[in-house]
Image (cartoon, rainbow, N blue to C red):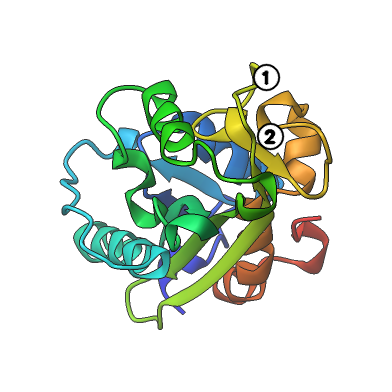
Amino acid sequence: MSSSASSGSGVPPRLVLATQNRGKAREFEAFFLGRLRVESLADHPEVVMPEEAGATFEANARQKAEHIATVLGLPALGDDSGLAVDALAGAPGVHSARYAEGTDKDRYNKLLSVLQGIDASARTARFVCALAFAAPGAHTAVATGEVRGEIAASPRGEGGFGYDPVFLPAATPGRTMAELSPAEKQAISHRGEALLRLQPTLLAYFSLAAGGAPP
């Protein structure tokens, strides 16, 4: 096990998350109850990320994690997620963040336009998240999570981000993801599900005590 995986000095081991969002890094750190020091790319401005070239969420997550682990020599977590609409053969998929120029609103409005006239029964979709863990000298592990639901006829709600205002999770009938409280959203989170599936690999690598495992 690499020295970065041990915290014998009492200092939490470091994990670099492939995102510029410090808030997301704090969420991951909270998930591990502070037993890991989760850093974001905002803490490493020297890292230049390659353009996403994968055809799947898993491939992109793996690319991000392995690039950071190679450049920094530190364990890294790559995250790639998006919306897959069945009536559109899985689109926008890995292109979710680039589905339309402009803002999140521009992207979900384009989606609503494309789906105009399609019956509710055929508007099924899912949010997908792939997480990849890579570390120097270790085998890269990948896990996925998803939330199933359907695309609403119009946007609703002020919370969340991305396509949340137009996604109706099956677990919360009648409410879009943007209408859920943070706790409700976390309870059905595709990212949380992927992280739980990756948990055994992370616990083994960092040798976290059972008492420090995520809930």
202 in relation to 177, above or below: below
166 in relation to 51, above or below: above
* Apparent side of residue 147 relative to residue 95 in the rendered image (left or right): right
Q: Which mark is residue 157?
A: 1
**Splitting the image into 4 quarters, where does residue 158 fall?**
top right
- Is label 2 in a helix, a strand or a loop? helix
Query: Residue 33: where, in percent of width, then height?
Result: 71, 46
- Sooner in the amino-acid sequence: mark 2 or mark 1: 1
- Is label 1 in a helix, a strand or a loop? loop
Residue placed most toward the observer, 43 or 144: 144
Residue 204 visible in image: yes
Do residues under tags 2 and 1 come within 8 Å of each other at their CB atoms?
yes
Identified by mark 1, the residue type is Gly
Report, in whole angstroms, how far the alpha carbon at label 2 lies from the one at label 1: 8 Å
Counting the numbered discs, the total is 2
Q: Which residue is mark 2?
A: 177
